[in-house]
Image: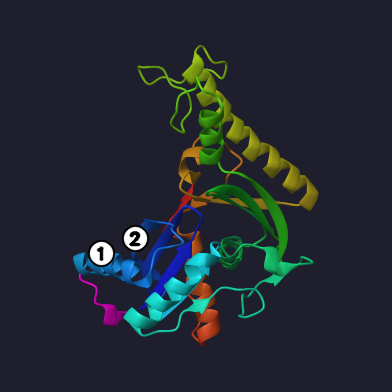
Amino acid sequence: MLLAIDVGNTNIVFAICDGDEIKWRWRISTDGQRTADEYAVWLHQLMQLEGVERTHVDSAIIATVVPQTLFNLQRLCRKYFQVDALVVAVGNINLGLRIDLANPSEVGADRLVNAIAAHAETPGNLIIVDFGTATTFDVVSADGAYQGGVIAPGINLSMDALYQAAAKLPRIAVEPPTSPSGGNLGVIGKGTVHAMQSGVFWGYVGLIEGLVARITSEIGGAVTVIATGGLATLFNRHTSAIDKVDGDLTIRGLIRIHALNSGQSEPEKNINSDETR
């Protein structure tokens, strides 16, 4: 089985995969000071709860946007699983994707992994929207070239900045404004919380729709928009700019990259986790 590790700025996802099937996944907050032993204690306990033995893992792959986590994650794989992890890095491995940028190494590993999975599973021009610590828009051409994209502050970063910089504004949840009875309210705020919810939520809907429209116009052809990340499903319910949601896109990209670099046949397309609008 494959241990796939996706390190984001906020969380790390550990997934154990059998072929192209994601069997188990666990999440822990990202901490660049966490040791291999600490990872091992936490992960081993969760594996035991699911009845998974460490010896079931015979390979590993890591994609990280937090460089200081890499050493201890590699040590985790070597010391506790007796495998050398494949590390996603431009120029070192076969990504199965052309990168049409002057400095390919500048692209975050998570963005490339998403692009690889999306291109392998969905034909045509693509925009991948990832709702993470940052909200990213990545563009892949129909012939399999990563074209670049857009990086915007994530919605939680924006809310934290608003709360911390304005003394009288409260913390709010990421959701459209609703009345106490559950009915939808308009965009014009009738109170502080309502106004903040409108600004944050509908502001981000406007960001998504505006950038997708501008990118699509720049591409000049039909485009499929795929969303991933924790808030993808929520925003998908409130905009027609997203064509489908895929919460497992990054892990399936790691599975595919591992297959490309280990001599295995590429995994079949898995459509079970896609949520279409």
Write the start and end of the magenta stretch as one range.
Answer: 51-57
Give the quadrant of residue 110: bottom right
Q: What residue is pinned by disc 1? A: 46
Say if 46 sits above or below 158 in the image.
below
| Quarter occupied by the N terminus | bottom left
Circle 2 residues within 10 Å: few <14, some 14–19, many ≥20: some
Q: Is residue 262 left or right of residue 40?
A: right
Which residue is pictured at 66% across the width and 63% down the height? 107
Nearer to the camera, 10 or 35? 35
For the image, the number of numbered tags is 2
Residue 161: image location, x then y, percent: 55, 34
Which residue is pictured at 48% across the width and 66% down the height? 69
Residue 271: image location, x then y, percent: 46, 61
Label at residue 26: 2
Circle 1 sits in a helix, a strand or a loop, which is it? helix
Which residue is pictured at 51% across the width and 35% down the height? 160
Say if 44 sits above or below 164 in the image.
below
- Amino acid of disc 1: Leu
Real-space Cα separation, disc 1 to disc 2, in angstroms: 8 Å
Q: Is residue 54 left or right of residue 233?
A: left
Question: Do the CB atoms of the residues marked 1 and 2 lie less than 8 Å apart?
Answer: yes
Residue 78: image location, x then y, percent: 39, 82
Circle 2 sits in a helix, a strand or a loop, which is it? strand
Residue 213: image location, x then y, percent: 71, 41
